[in-house]
Amino acid sequence: MIRYSTDPVAVTASNWGWRHAGRSRFAVRKLDLDIQPGERVLLLGASGAGKSTLLAALAGVLGNDDEGEQEGSLLLDGGSPASRRGRAGLVLQDPDSQVVLARVGDEVAFGAENLAVPRAEIWKRVHRALDDVGLDVPLDRSTSALSGGQKQRLALASVLAMQPGLLLLDEPTANLDPQGVIEVRDAVVRVLERTAATLVVVEHRVEVWANVVDRVVVLGPDGGILADGTPAEVLGEEAARRSLAGAGVWVPGWKPEVEGHLPGTAGDPLLSTRGLAVARTRRGAEVLTGVDLELSAASALSIVGPNGAGKSTLALTLAGLLKPRRGRVTAEALLECGAGADPARWRSAELVQRIGTVFQEPEHQFLTSTVADELEFGPRRVTREPESSFRPRTSDLAERLRLVHLLTANPFTLSGGEKRRLSVATMLATSPDILVLDEPTFGQDAVTWAELVGLLRGLVSGGGCVVSVTHDADFTEALGNRILDVRAGGVVQRGTP
């Protein structure tokens, strides 16, 4: 059994690279990097540059020779990461893939138990970690009952309770509300001050971490390091800022340009709700009540609010994937279903052609073994379009969303940002009247964010409706600023319908 140690870890990479099995290109290559014990590093780079791959390698969970090819060396305190397991704690991009136990308290205690931390110390750590990340739920709360943002806090608390010598965070605030972002960032800082652990954090919200790290390292899209220095050196000089922005890095104060324009006024109604109450499960408590809403053609709506308020539950109900607890969701005749139809009663093939849904976890909607097949699955199997009709559309989506080089790859092996773009593309390929998206810009660099927003603007301009659960204020602004604010069991609408 591994004994726990909280001493800070040193990292050394010498011409290190990794190629995933079945891929022709290396995910990371020609990496030379030294991180001193206790150093705090913000790791940046374009989507697909290999940031998550590097973190998985440092945690010792990347795989063996059957799962890929390694070149060069990567060491923790002079030894291989596999021989130092337990010294690094990794928070994954997708918190669902990290939760293993049924109750919150057991989940947070699990890592420390496996490191043979004394029992009396474990539960002190559990309570402190939950307090640090602001997850105020009973220890016996079911982990499956948590929202996506709450699961993200849970995953972080589980790793913080281990007090690792190397803390590895992969987009730790991606699905959190603005207040939660600051709370989690401050929680990490408090733990680092207590333990002096080494930190490597991957995050597209550069401004959140720039003031609490010692160093910024930017991975190049074709290998090696594009920039390395203090935050002021890497992010402060205008020439460097321009270069990084062109490479897709989210530079503070720099907004990407988005193609396309939105229509000035909304069109005819597509979907409406009256007295709607929603719940996460058939027998669960109502999380929102009294929702009266109208979704119109040529419009966009952002659903915002704190984690756990019911945003995703509302979105799934609007999409016809959850039945209303009370009230009505009514589709209009423009959806070619007859006025008064209830989307929750449609067959899946009928639903996907009218209302497409992009889940918070992209893996939940992948059905095939290659990116190309995934893009064509909807048009080929559901809409029954001829290949000559849908192939130009799917090819254009792959090109614009930077997926062409991944067409033969398995969707489940993509990076988090690539999975998100693919999940959006699969729904766009079916040309639905209404597209419902949960955290659509998660994991995107500045370039892919602009392409994604441009495609959604095009859908709206063409008469479609886009409904997004999001904490991304720039995204909301780019799609017209119409907002449904979900708080304390109710909603407040802002902006022009």
Image (cartoon, helix red, strand yellow):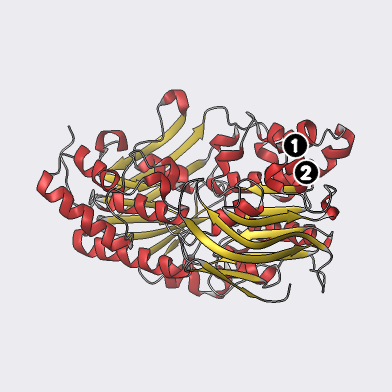
Which residue is at a point 19% across and 62% down the rendered structure image? Answer: 194
Mark 1: which amino acid? Answer: Ala
x, y percent for residue 42: 41, 60
Which residue position is annotated with label 1? 349
Which secondary structure, mark 2? Answer: helix
Percent coordinates x, y for residue 345 in the rendering: 70, 42
* Occupied quadrant, residue 445: bottom right
In the rendered structure, the answer to whether residue 200 lies left or right of residue 409 reads left
Q: Is residue 118 above or below residue 83?
A: below
Q: Quadrant of the C terminus?
A: bottom right
Residue 353's tag is 2
Where residue 311 sits: x, y (%)?
Answer: 54, 59
x, y (%) of residue 269? 80, 63
Of 332 and 10, the residue lying toward us: 332
Residue at 62% x, 32% y is: 409
**What's the distance in space between the residues labelled 1 and 2, CA to CA?**
7 Å
